[in-house]
């Protein structure tokens, strides 16, 4: 069974280990940098379209983040 906490952990790690800063990620997504920060600190998950774009920006598979691989 896939748990939300595990998905958030993998997303948090992908953001933290990205060569891009949170500000750069936010700019590419067209969102406020504090929102990206919330993805790494709080139990906040992006909308599906934002999640898909975030995976593309981070060059990580959505399947990997979702724990499907």
Image: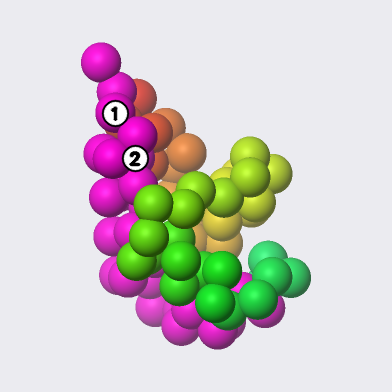
Secondary structure, magenta segment, majority class? helix
Work out whether 23 lies above or below 56: below
Looking at the image, the residue that sits furthest to the right is 30
Residue 27 left/right relative to 3: right
Quadrant of the rendered image containing residue 7: top left
Other-residue count near label 2 (Cα within 10 Å), few / some / many at <14 / 14–19 / ≥20? some
Helix, strand or loop under label 1: loop
Q: Is residue 54 visible?
A: yes
Is 47 in the magenta? Answer: no
Task: Report x, y in % for residue 62.
Answer: 47, 39
The colour style of the image is rainbow
For image coordinates 58% across by 79% down, the residue present is 33
For image coordinates 57% across by 50% down, the residue present is 46
| Magenta span of residues | 1-27
Residue 35 left/right relative to 40: right
The residue carrying mark 1 is 3
Task: Report x, y in % for residue 48.
Answer: 63, 39
For image coordinates 28% across by 60% down, the residue present is 13
Residue 64 left/right relative to 25: left
Work out whether 43 lies above or below 65: below
For image coordinates 38% across by 71% down, the residue present is 18
The residue carrying mark 2 is 7
Helix, strand or loop under label 2: helix
Q: Are marks 2 and 1 in contact (CB under 8 Å)?
A: yes
Observer-nearest of 15 and 43: 43
Q: Is residue 14 visible?
A: no
Residue at mark 2 to residue at mark 1: CA–CA distance? 7 Å
């Amino acid at each position: 069974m896939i748990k939300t906490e595990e998905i958030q952990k993998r997303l948090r790690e992908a953001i933290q280990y990205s060569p891009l800063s949170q500000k750069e990620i936010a700019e590419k997504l067209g969102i406020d940098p504090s929102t990206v920060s919330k993805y790494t600190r709080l139990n906040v998950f992006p909308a599906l379209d934002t999640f898909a774009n975030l995976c593309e920006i981070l060059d990580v598979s959505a399947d990997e983040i979702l724990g499907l691989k």
